[in-house]
Image (cartoon, rainbow, N blue to C red):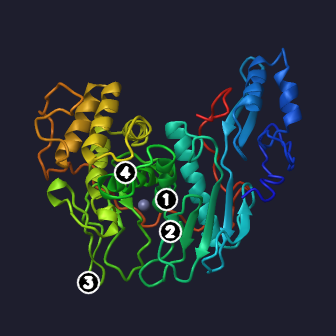
Amino acid sequence: MSEDAIGGARHTEEGTSARQGTEEGTPIRQGIVPSYLLSRLAESGLYRQAAQAARQTLIAPSPLQHRTQLRLSIDEHGSLVAEVEAAPDRTISDAHNTEELPGTVVRREGDAPVADTAVDQAYDGLGATFAMLLDAFERNSIDGAGAPLDASVHYGTDYDNAFWNGERMVFGDGDGEVFQHFTASTTVIGHELGHGVIQSTANLEYAGQPGALNESIADVFGALTEQHLRDQTVDQATWLIGAGIFTKNVKGVALRSMLHPGTAYDDPELGKDPQPADMSGYVQTTDDNGGVHINSGIPNRAFALFAVAVGGKAWETAGSVWYRALTGTLSPKATFAEFAEATIREAEAVGTSTADAARAAWTSVGVVATGAGADSSTRTKKADAPKKGEAPRKGEAPKKPKSGKKSPKGEKKSPEGEKKPAKRETGKAGNA
Ligand SMILES: [Zn+2]
């Protein structure tokens, strides 16, 4: 993955188009602005904010290939303003229908789209996930320190899955009969990269309840990635995971429904979506690592209910509460109840009504007992807790095109392929 690093990343930003080639052995991150220019800027007595930003850029802990961009602009007083913003560092490889990873590199950061939809969709999906993490949580990539985002497409032959292998996203092509277009689903990509975030934070054990939490939180990242990309409110969101990866042959809309677990598909061949919507349906099994993809429906629904109750854009308040619970003191062996407690505690830090909404959501799915506060709370408010099975319907998915993204197909794309990350962190290298 360090082959040629980001050699000659052809990033062109407004205000500056300096380009930094590969400087072997230099510990300084490789961005579009050469380090000599940053050093010079760091000395500036005139451009104090820019100098500060440049210093931060130069001294910030710099893991391999940590990427940033320096954005220069003029403020209302005519002063030069430099802002350091984190930027994704994507590399897409083609496994050429073998199971050898990573395959050959076919598109690097800043490269123009190529004549392969899977490659471009993977590139865009990684970018969408990066943008959501940065914008919603000020998290600079999966590890919070600008880790490169790598993916391999065309993995295996008719391979029916997409996964995170601890280092990269891997996409099969699907068999074309039941599964297709894994790369087209933003929720799938956000989910898989979400596993990377979880791995580098709470590192929830992948079995039983912590495993189902791991799956569920990955779904939360997936849903938030899509909602953020589409700029959807909780009421506009589909709350579906993997919409569009079934072919038309299948009676179903997606792999999972966060708001209505158990309803994503019901197909004569594939059977019915097995996810329970609350603890009364909790599945005890040794399959699937103890039902991690099944019981995840329970915390999934808690999140969706919470987000819908809070309203607005899910990544703003609801997502932040979940994220802070994940990145706080959560045990790798956390149970549903322990995670619920952590989220309620984080929600309390936001405000009473948010905490009430979190408690009500967990009560709704039977994780927190009706009338009981979370263990950490002495309150016993239960007034607005919906009763079991009484899901608010207002978050019902609107009719939306099934698979989010059109094929980029190389038309009308900037060399960067897509919008830039929205977040700008003044004077900060973004290694939060
Ligand atoms: Zn998963």
Q: What's the CA distance linking mark 4 and mark 3?
A: 30 Å
Q: Which residue is mark 1?
A: 192
Q: Position of residue 427 (x, y in %)?
A: 68, 26
Q: Which residue is mark 3?
A: 268
Of mark 4 and mark 3, the one earlier in the sequence is 4
Of mark 2 and mark 1, the one earlier in the sequence is 2
Q: Quadrant of the N terminus?
A: bottom right
Q: What's the CA distance linking mark 1 and mark 3?
A: 28 Å
Q: Is residue 235 above or below residue 35?
A: below
User: What amino acid is found at the position of numbered circle 4 in the picture?
Assistant: Gln
Of mark 4 and mark 2, the one earlier in the sequence is 2
**For residue 211, which numbered disc appears in the image?**
none
**Is residue 340 visible in the rendered structure shown here?**
yes
**Is residue 73 visible in the rendered structure shown here?**
no
Do the CB atoms of the residues marked 1 and 3 lie less than 8 Å apart?
no
Q: Residues within 10 Å of mark 2 (few under 14, many from 20)?
A: many
Q: Position of residue 137 (x, y in %)?
A: 50, 38
Q: Nearer the viewer, mark 4 or mark 2?
A: 2
Q: What's the CA distance linking mark 1 and mark 4?
A: 23 Å
**For residue 236, which numbered disc appears in the image?**
4
- Label 1 sits on a secondary structure element that is helix
User: What amino acid is found at the position of numbered circle 3 in the picture?
Assistant: Pro
